[in-house]
Image: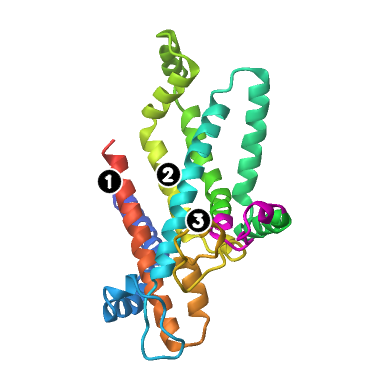
Amino acid sequence: MKPLMLRKIRSLTMLALISTAFALTLLPVLSLIGTVVYNGMSVVFRNFPGIFFDIPAAPGSSEVGGIGPHLLGTMLLVALAMAIGTPISILAAVFTAEAIKSWERNLGRLTRLLTHMMIEFPTIVVGLAVYGLMTTLAPYIRALIPGFRPFSLLSGVIALIMVSAPYMYAQVEDGLKSIPQHIREAVYSLGAGRVLTSYVLLRYLKSTVYAAISISLARMISETAALFFTAFGSNVYPPLDSNLLFRPVGSLTLAVYTLGLSGYENWVELSWAASFILLMLCLALFALSKVVIRGE
């Protein structure tokens, strides 16, 4: 056999093996997505649009109700955690990457070490730590806020920040470190201070910042374990008053877990609906982030 023909056979064989391995890798993911869509979409359309606003029906009844409280709880948890965690993560990353003085570099190294350690923490440990902290502080906080509870929206927000902030910090810090030094020197040479220089460098890294925010947002939306001992979950709408932060709230991920394990057929069906909506939210977030990043 000629050497050229032999090389072509080897190339086609390896291409076939790689394609087969790729297809086998995608098969479980596609199977999972298909199962969630098949089981969840029918439940959503059975009570559309009430599925987005109603509370879960009575267990064991012929109705499925809706996941309104869980959707509201997810929006509250994610909105508050993003509003607090995003500036903290980005400013910490800027401080670490742009440290100049000796004490700043030492503090930056310590911050980098702790945040990378937090990335490896099991999220349920984070939830337990937040619950333990809130339980310890509860007697003192109740002296100021009588309605305070360790299981609350506030506890869930703190847990989500601790889970997601390290990912945003690491992404932004790596991006700042990858900027060529001559760009940084050019900005300083124009007379810009450290604050203005950091702003210019972040503008230079808009795609990286958007990607970091998207990753952090996806972590918050899909997080379950950290909310078991913090947000706790609720099948009813929380009263929208001054004590909202100190009451338990539901979330889509907790709804998938608790309703799916309930043993009642209508609640299990509602769990499939919550899974479908959660999947659609994550896919929409992924698609939106791709559009935004490519537009930069």
- Tally of marks: 3
Q: Nearer the viewer, residue 82 or 257?
A: 82
**Image quarter for residue 42?**
bottom left
Q: Position of residue 29 (x, y in %)?
A: 40, 66
Magenta extent: 140-156
Q: Which residue occupies the foreground of this view, 227 or 76? A: 76
**Residue 154: % across, % down:** 56, 55
> In the rendered structure, does residue 35 fall within the stretch colored magenta?
no
Residue at 47% x, 50% y is 80
Tell me the SS state at disc 3. loop
Q: Which residue is mark 2?
A: 213
Which residue corresponds to mark 1? Answer: 291
Q: For marks 2 and 3, give the CA distance.
A: 29 Å
Asked which secondary structure carries label 1, the reply is helix
Q: Tell me where residue 36 sits by quadrant.
A: bottom left
The numbered mark, 1 or 2, whose residue comes first in the sequence reads: 2
Residue 28 horizontal side relative to residue 291, left or right: right
In the image shown, does 38 or 150 lie closer to the viewer?
Answer: 150
Kindly report which numbered mark, 3 or 1, lies closer to the viewer in this rendering.
Answer: 3
Q: Is residue 55 above or below residue 193?
A: below
Q: Which residue is mark 3?
A: 242
Structural distance between the alpha carbons of marks 1 and 2: 14 Å
